[in-house]
Amino acid sequence: MFDRIKSVNLDAQHPLSSGLTADSRLVRAYQGTRPDVTPVWFMRQAGRSLPEYRELRVGTRMLDACLDPAMASEITLQPVRRHGVDAGIFFSDIVVPLKLVGVDVEIVAGKGPVLGTAVRTGADVATLTTLDPAVLDSALAPIQEGVARTVAEMGATPLIGFAGAPFTLAAYLVEGGPSKDHIHARTLMHSDPEAWAALMAWTAEVTGRFLRAQVLAGASAAQLFDSWAGALPLADYTTHVAPASVAAIGHVKDLGYVERSADAAADPVEVHRSVPIVHFGVGTGELLAAMHDIGADVVGVDYRVPLDEANRRLGGGVPLQGNVDPALLAAPWPVLEAHVLDVLERGRTAPSHVLNLGHGVPPDTDPAVLSRVVELVHEASAADSAAASAASAE
Ligand SMILES: Cc1c2[nH]c(c1CCC(=O)O)Cc1[nH]c(c(CCC(=O)O)c1C)Cc1[nH]c(c(CCC(=O)O)c1C)Cc1[nH]c(c(C)c1CCC(=O)O)C2
């Protein structure tokens, strides 16, 4: 195990250390400083809404695509080139580290991750956890190569690394596949709390190593997806889930870099900074503060809670990411435009805001609409900032 107390600096070539991405809109906003132009990217921007993605994926299974560094890198770059978004998110999947550690899992098109056998009992958990997370150190080489190739192409545009949170992964492991209410997972949590804790601790280590590998290879931020945490009451979340999420992000919490201030010419200032960590879930309006409390810097908000209300629930000091309703991407442009402007305005109540969707891009989205949203966000936020600074100068 690495030392979680001592801070580890990323190497000098890392885009944060070298200064390439440290002053980007995305990294600044994640650190709580509001840039003049609000940064924007979309969850699931790399994928089926793009014809160039569908063409490249013909004949290659999802998880094979993830483990092909050239293909994963090209798919990551496609939406960055096409839409002019302020960040890339590495093309991979939350179940990739499970596969690499030896779990029998496949991704079925139109369905999601499906397990060979579900992990239902304490005995099943005992068998699963004999798989050694340390094998990931070498097995993650194709992921790290994919990240390195990608950041070499991206220049000053930051790449976001990501991983599934332990609960969302455990929900797939215990259910054996996608599920509406995650009832078997929630039963195991209470019927065998020890087995549940062992499952969560193992999953945290596997997914934490996946996240750390991406940051070390060049990602400038890390996002933990707890997509299904919204199925939980707050008490279950804090008791049975949050400790494992703390452990998962513990794998990147110690990673940092030194920034040298450019404007203090007479007296150069060195600031130690951490790699920003974002935490997102779906239907997690009741859990927002608890999800911040695991040690995240930024909270991703789904489309159900308006950003000003999310900001209020978080006490007013937390950078927010979100939360355009994906359903409105298919609405007439004036409807979508008004909604995006409303999201920007509500986002102004928070210390800083990264515009995103409240969940992933639907596969049938017209890519031209996404490009148009990026343009709108950049233009409208720049005009707002100009008006605000003119008003404060008066
Ligand atoms: C729950 C979850 C999964 N995977 C992921 C989550 C968390 C985010 C969320 O809540 O949506 C995370 C994920 N999966 C994928 C990305 C790529 C980066 C990006 O956001 O652009 C990311 C960040 C690619 C993918 N992951 C998957 C695809 C589609 C597979 C294909 O193109 O054949 C992509 C592009 C497969 C997948 N994998 C998963 C699902 C539910 C599916 C969809 C199944 C389907 O509808 O076909 C599990």
Image (cartoon, grey):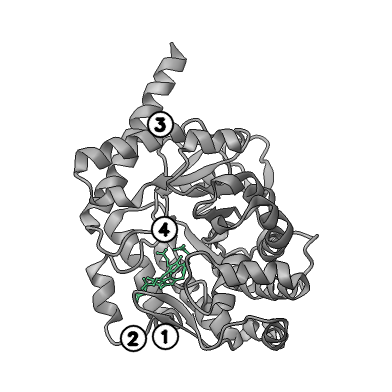
In the picture, measured across the screen, residue 210 lies left or right of residue 387, that is right
Q: Residue at x 72, y 64 (%)?
A: 247
- Residue occupying the far top of the picture: 394
Report if the beta carbon of the residue with label 4 is closer than 8 angstroms to ligand 1: yes
Which tag, 3 or 4, sits closer to the chain's start? Answer: 4
Name the quadrant of the N terminus: bottom right
> In the rendered structure, are the residues bearing label 4 and label 1 in contact, judged by CB atoms less than 8 Å apart?
no
Mark pair 3, 4: CA separation: 21 Å
In the picture, measured across the screen, residue 82 lies left or right of residue 154, that is left
Name the quadrant of the C terminus: top left
> In the rendered structure, are the residues bearing label 3 and label 4 in contact, judged by CB atoms less than 8 Å apart?
no
Report if the beta carbon of the residue with label 3 is closer than 8 angstroms to ligand 1: no
- Residue 291: x and y in percent read 63, 51
How crowded pointer 2 is (Cα within 10 Å; few <14, some 14-19, many 20+) is rated as few
Q: Nearer the viewer, residue 66 or 182?
A: 182
Q: Mark 1: which amino acid?
A: Asp
Q: Mark 4: which amino acid?
A: Met
Query: What residue is disc 3 on?
Result: 345
Query: What residue is disc 2 on?
Result: 60
- Residue 163: x and y in percent read 55, 67
- Residue 181: x and y in percent read 52, 64
Q: Quadrant of residue 345?
A: top left
Mark 2 residue element: loop
Query: What residue is disc 4 on?
Result: 43
How crowded pointer 3 is (Cα within 10 Å; few <14, some 14-19, many 20+) is rated as some
Mark pair 2, 3: CA separation: 42 Å
Mark pair 4, 1: CA separation: 21 Å
Q: Nearer the viewer, residue 290 or 183?
A: 183
Mark sitting on residue 64: 1
Q: Is residue 209 positioned above or below 377 on the image?
A: below
